[in-house]
Image (spheres, rainbow, N blue to C red):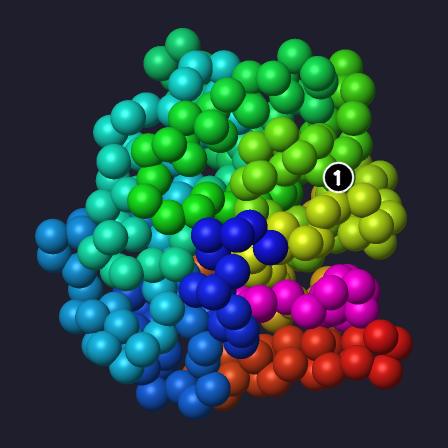
Amino acid sequence: MIGGAEAAMDRLGVGIGWRPELDLTIERMEGVGFVEVVAENVWPAGLPESLVRLRERGLPVIPHGVSLGIGDAEPPDPARLAHLAACAEALGSPLVSEHLAFVRGGGIEAGHLLPVPRTRDALRVVIENVRRAQDALPVPLALENVAAIFGWPDDELTEAQFLAELVEATDVGLLIDVANLYNNEVNLGLPAVAALDVLPLDHLTYVHVGGGYEAHGIWHDTHTTRAPQAVLDLLTELCARTTPPGVLLEWDDDYPSDAVLADELARIRTAMAAAGARR
């Protein structure tokens, strides 16, 4: 694991993405080890009371950015980096996470986390962008693989190869979303289990699990349903290769009952435990 985060990230356990709609649910849930908050949805000078209470109870809170655009052609916006840094400091976070995604160009917002062209030229740009971000942040940075419904025609590397070379060049951490690996296997034909054999799991910071739905042969990563068993099977495959510091459930809309969320956390724990015998 990345050196600066090793002690702080040791054994986060099973967590859940904090959302305002789930604040009371998360506060009364048993067995939650950590939470993640969308950085763009909080203001460091006026944190939600729920997050303050969770921090006072000792739960780590990780700011998770969605708009930095580390895969853009332009360098990361200093103001966005400053906000991520301020969130980490206000929350006492062990790290900051973001997406390896293209989100804007020439002042035009894509409105979506688009996949980065997996070319050598793009890799050189992303390496420089990651280094700029690392210099601006007070804690380690981890990057998440994104879900896609298309691939660029001139890709030279697989997603796993691109991430592996990026990690080698920058020592950046990895946030592996197993639901996104499944998404990209369905939509792009990128074998998910094979990706786990290429990704540098020694740089794993934590894992995302979430649900979605298939329509007309396309998988949509919506975080609005239970995780399909295929995603949990990928979690088991990952845990058979390494012990992740933490695994986090994402649920972003159409919020279910407390019982359903608790059952999803139990399913995650079961999938993790299933890897024990294989190891």
Residue 142 in the figure: left or right of residue 174 = left
Residue 60 position (above or below residue 110) = below
The amino acid type of the residue labelled 1 equals Ala
Residue 234 in the figure: left or right of residue 171 = right
Residue 55 position (above or below residue 262) = above
Q: Nearer the viewer, residue 119 or 232?
A: 119
The answer to whether residue 203 shows anywhere in this view is yes
Is residue 237 in the magenta section? yes
Residue 144 in the figure: left or right of residue 133 = right
**Badge 1 density bin: few <14, some 14–19, many ≥20, Cα 10 Å:** many
Q: Nearer the viewer, residue 6 or 110?
A: 6
Residue 145: image quadrant is top right
Is residue 23 in the magenta section? no
Query: Could you tell me residue 183's position as x and y percent?
Result: 71, 48
Which stretch appears magenta? 232-249
Query: Could you tell me residue 278's position as x and y percent?
Result: 88, 76
Residue 271 position (above or below residue 135) = below
The answer to whether residue 214 shows anywhere in this view is no
Residue shown at 59% from the left, 78% from the top = 264
Question: What is the quadrant of the N terminus in the image?
Answer: bottom right
Residue shown at 50% from the left, 21% from the top = 128
Query: Could you tell me residue 233's position as x and y percent?
Result: 79, 68
Question: What is the quadrant of the C terminus in the image?
Answer: bottom right
Residue shown at 58% from the left, 39% from the top = 171
Residue shown at 51% from the left, 46% from the top = 142
The residue carrying mark 1 is 160
Q: Residue furthest left?
A: 45
Residue 170 position (above or below residue 11) = above
Secondary element under disc 1, as helix, strand or loop, is helix
Residue 77 in the figure: left or right of residue 193 = left
Query: Could you tell me residue 209's position as x and y percent?
Result: 61, 63
